[in-house]
Amino acid sequence: MSIVMHAVGDSIAGLGVFVRDCSGKPLMVAGKRMFSVAADMMEVQAIIMAFDLLREFLPQYRAVEFQSDSMTALQVARDMVTKPSREGVLAVTLQYVKAMEALRFSHIHREGNEPADWAARRACTHEFIWGPRESLPQPLIKLMLSDFLFDPP
């Protein structure tokens, strides 16, 4: 499974998370709207959002790769998982991620992040979650068709 995150915006940020299985099939696409002025912290928030989505909606997946185009956010997230707090609002989620069978944080170029970027931009106007049993919007499908990992049914 691969999870791609992205944050976009100035004072209003959209967090986008695009979750796919090892074959490139989309499992979940989510977007959340937040207020912020720090882009790197929004990237970290997108990673935390991905952690929460995984724990809540896709707990059967125990080997995960988190991808982001922000090296800083990846390092912060890796540090949070390596030494998770035992208390606080993130404690349960961080302990869950740390206990995964396989976990990797990977840097990707912004061009490899287009589905998550689309989700982040859409989230600037409204929040959403699309699951595997729902039809994905046409613009997102077009982006995915240009991605070599996606093989439509």
Image: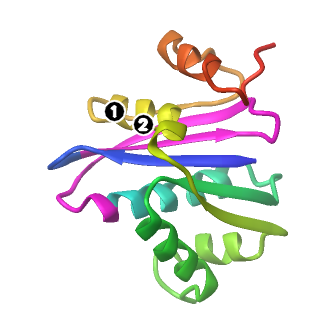
State which quadrant residue 127 falls in: top left
Q: Which residue is pictured at 51% across the width and 67% down the height? A: 74
Give coordinates of residue 27: x percent, y percent: 70, 34
Give coordinates of residue 80: x percent, y percent: 53, 80
Give coordinates of residue 105: x percent, y percent: 63, 64
Mark 1: amino acid:
Arg
Residue named by callout 1: 121
Q: Does residue 74 show up magenta in the picture? A: no
Q: Which residue is pictured at 33% across the width and 58% down the height? A: 42
Q: Which residue is pictured at 74% across the width and 67% down the height? A: 103
3D distance between C-alphas at marks 2 and 1? 6 Å
**In the image shown, does 30 or 139 lie closer to the viewer?**
139
In the rendered structure, are the residues bearing label 2 and label 1 in contact, judged by CB atoms less than 8 Å apart?
yes
Give coordinates of residue 4: x percent, y percent: 56, 46
The vertical placement of 78 against 14, above or below, is: below
**In the image shown, does 99 or 107 lie closer to the viewer?**
107
Main secondary structure found in the magenta portion:
strand
Q: Does residue 22 show up magenta in the picture? A: yes
What number is the disc on residue 117?
Answer: 2
Q: In screen coordinates, is 12 left or right of 86?
A: left
Residue range highlighted in magenta: 13-41
Identify the coloring: rainbow
